[in-house]
């Protein structure tokens, strides 16, 4: 009977410690990798990405930036600060990579493909109408998106 009481007390102690461990926030160490290990060749700040792309709509590169928000932890989608109030919407190329929500605010190195969204406007179809002449010029305001292959926690 005494052995059962000691075993039961030890069992409750272990269960209590496991539940307390599960509630602790996960600490992300420097160098933690999600996906493939990112390449650091041609590494640039996320704030200079749009200027570096110029007129190109697609470029393979590696950037350093701060994660503002993890939009979907299970699908690996997140938002990166691009400076001057701009953001880069990013997601992982492969499914099944989940990001912890506490990666928010951390500086990361990301490698993958950056793309500009193409805003098509068929001006020929509306030629001569006032609507075509009043449409604002959206050049340079195309949102950037990033398809990440690998991400590493930098700071």
Image (spheres, rainbow, N blue to C red):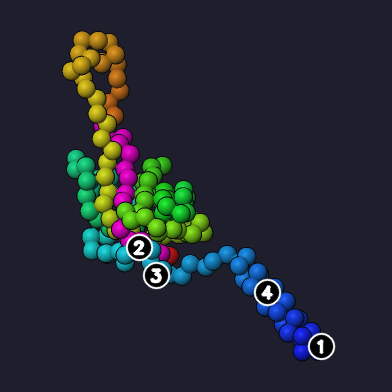
Foreground: disc 3 or disc 2: 2
105 relative to 86 in the view: left or right: right
77 relative to 15 in the view: left or right: left
Numbered disc 1: secondary structure = loop
Q: Which residue is mark 1?
A: 1
Instruction: State the CA–CA distance, disc 2 to disc 4.
Output: 33 Å
Q: Position of residue 109 (x, y in %)?
A: 35, 61
Q: Is 58 a magenta residue? A: no
> Badge 3: how crowded within 10 Å, few (<14), some, or many (20+)?
some
Taking 116 as reference, is 8 above or below it?
below
Q: Quadrant of the N terminus?
A: bottom right
Instruction: State the CA–CA distance, disc 2 to disc 1.
Output: 52 Å
Q: Which residue is mark 2?
A: 35
Which mark is on residue 106? none
Which mark is on residue 15? 4
Q: Quadrant of the C terminus?
A: bottom left
Q: Which range is magenta? A: 139-153
21 relative to 39 in the view: left or right: right
Q: Main secondary structure of the magenta part?
A: strand
Q: Which residue is mark 3?
A: 31
Q: Residue furthest right?
A: 1
Foreground: disc 4 or disc 1: 1
Name which residue lies at 42% across and 52% down. 75
The answer to which of marks 2 and 4 sits earlier in the sequence is 4
Q: Is 148 a magenta residue? A: yes
Instruction: State the CA–CA distance, disc 4 to disc 3.
Output: 32 Å
The answer to which of marks 3 and 1 sits earlier in the sequence is 1
């Amino acid at each position: 009977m005494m052995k059962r009481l000691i075993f039961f007390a030890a069992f409750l102690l272990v269960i209590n410690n496991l539940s307390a461990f599960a509630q602790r926030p996960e600490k992300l160490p420097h160098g933690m990798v999600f996906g493939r290990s990112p390449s650091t060749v041609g590494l640039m700040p996320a704030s200079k990405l749009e200027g570096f792309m110029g007129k190109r709509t697609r470029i393979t590169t590696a950037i350093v930036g701060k994660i503002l928000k993890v939009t979907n932890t299970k699908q690996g989608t997140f938002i990166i600060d691009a400076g001057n109030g701009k953001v880069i919407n990013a997601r992982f190329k492969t499914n099944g990579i989940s990001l912890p929500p506490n990666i928010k605010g951390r500086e990361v190195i990301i490698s993958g493909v950056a793309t500009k969204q193409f805003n098509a406007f068929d001006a020929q179809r509306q030629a001569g109408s006032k609507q075509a002449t009043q449409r604002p010029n959206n050049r340079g305001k195309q949102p950037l998106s990033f398809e990440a292959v690998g991400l590493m926690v930098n700071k």
